[in-house]
Image: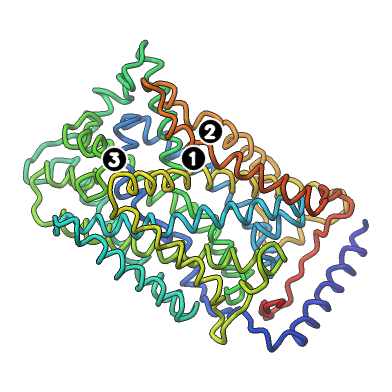
Amino acid sequence: MSSDDIEKKATSSGEIAAENVVHNKDNGHMHRSLKGRQISMIAIAGTIGTGLFLGSGKALANGGPVGALLGYLIVGMLVGLMMYSLGEMMVWDPSAGGFIEFSTRYIDPAMGFAMGWQFWFQTVITAPVEITAASIVISYWDKNENHRAIYITVMLIGIILVNLAGVKYFGEFEFVFAFIKILTVIGLVIVLLVVDLGGAPDHDRRGFRYWRDQPFNNAFFDVVPESKARFLGFWAVLTQAAFSYGGMEGLAMICLEASNPRVTMRTAVRAIFYRIVLLYVFSILLIGMCVSRDNEHLLQAVAQGASTAAQSPFVIIIQSSGIKVLDHIINAVVLTSAFSSGNEFLYSTSRSLFMLAQEGKAPRIFSRVMSNGVPVYSLAVCSLFACLGYLACGKEGANDAFNWLANITTLGSMITWMGIALAHIRWYKAMKLQGLSRDELPFKSWTQPFGAWVVLVSFLVIIFFSGYTTFMTKPFDFKSFISDYINIPFTVILYFGYKIVKRTSIVPLAEMDCSTHYVEDSVVYSKY
């Protein structure tokens, strides 16, 4: 296919899209009300929650200061490459339904079905996970566990009301909380630097003491020789880091509601680099400099699976260095961060269900949109699933079931990242075959085509070995094994089930629709 044919096809697609705008006015539409400053702030700090503030302690305990830093750095670079791949596609066609539609158009309709429902399941579970974590954080002040259900109820009502208010108010809410999170992380980095240099009340100049003493975990699972223990401890950090970075791909859900999407989304994708380096990697670097991986309080908190500020390495450092009051402030920020993350995950899961309905891969009713641009039925169903958070208030069995569901989300993120990379690889090949120049792309990354291949192969390896610790426990931990790998058969069943029922086939490169369907200043209308 020549470049002229591609241009004609794009023009035709634009005319069809414009025609659809005229004929679908009564069905409701998404509002492009998210401003550039809001999207950039969400991209930088939107999903920062318990993964960084609490989970980084587990990463330090497993991998040691150097192992934790390398793990977060490697996974961060991989996620950055993935976001550049996604960025190229969504800036080229911001009217598409994110990676759900890209998977349909560039790989196979069955892949779009599997990717969409897998992502929906991942985010619909993560929303109550973050809300429950926020309620548990409150136990730092209120020790009565019977009050947990009350806190969950209040926060659930809060995130539902924010999402019902419309994307304009959602954007302002996330902008404010993202700003608070960024200021907090910057402030904590400065505090840790002061502590490391001996400026805290204990006047203990740590320097790189813990890097010299034990840079890696020499006693991981009591494995011998030490070299093997170090490597396995480092490898365990990769999955933990993936959990911390999880949710970045949700930026694609914003495309349909972003004002001037080609400019704002391009800026947002570029901001991902600063988020990874400054907010995550630099924080992990300083944590490893200020506290030992075998710190008694850290190991105890990780072993008990505590979800309060007691598990946070930031709090452990501050308390051990003699700084007063600051631990309460950090706990308050962890609380607001978890609440904000739950709010964003509810947004992402409701929009993913809307996109599936738009493509005919979910009941049509879920694509209905209110006058303020909210897919109300999608939001209602996803809000019901958010009530799974109440399982954490039940007896031991119910709480175990909730924790089991929470563990599934990490693998789901990596599967989604692999799907995005595969869609980009095929899109890149089809553009080359059809004679469409990459110079026409509004956003072009220097990392391609190799970046997408690195993401696909790397996360395939990480996923394969993500549950290796279950084989090291005696007796065999079959519950953890299932939660570590259940997303794989789940996605495979979705893919082949849809493929068999609908008799779909992989899209040939020569016939692939590589054109953009975006019309300047257009909005996305509900098809049903």
Compute the Cα span from label 2 to label 1. 10 Å
Please give left or right for residue 513 compared with residue 102 in the image.
right
Q: Is residue 517 above or below residue 15?
A: above
Q: Residue at x 53, y 33 (%)?
A: 462
**Secondary structure at numbered mark 1:** helix
Quadrant assignment, res 100:
bottom right
- In front: 188, or 378? 378
Compute the Cα span from label 2 to label 3. 21 Å
- In front: 516, or 486? 486
Disc 2 vs disc 1: which is toward the camera?
2
Q: Of the two numbered discs 1 and 3 on the same chain, state the one appearing first in sequence.
A: 3
> Residue 442 location in percent, x, y?
69, 64
Q: Is residue 347 above or below residue 23?
A: above
The disc labelled 2 sits on which kind of residue? Ile
The C terminus appears in which quarter of the rendering? Answer: bottom right
Q: Is residue 512 above or below residue 355?
A: above
Tag 2 and tag 1, C-beta contact below 8 Å: yes
Quadrant assignment, res 290:
top left
Disc 1 vs disc 3: which is toward the camera?
3
Q: Which residue is mark 3?
A: 57
Q: Of the two numbered discs 2 and 3 on the same chain, state the one appearing first in sequence.
A: 3
Query: Crowdedness of circle 2 by 10 Å Cα count: few (<14), some, many (20+)?
Result: some
Q: Residue at x 65, y 47 (%)?
A: 419
Q: Of the two numbered discs 2 and 1 on the same chain, state the one appearing first in sequence.
A: 1
- Camera sees residue 430: no
Residue at the top extreme? 225
**Secondary structure at numbered mark 2:** helix
Q: Is residue 510 above or below residue 77?
A: below
The disc labelled 1 sits on which kind of residue? Val
Q: Which residue is mark 1?
A: 75
Q: Which residue is mark 2?
A: 462
Q: Residue at x 19, y 46 (%)?
A: 310
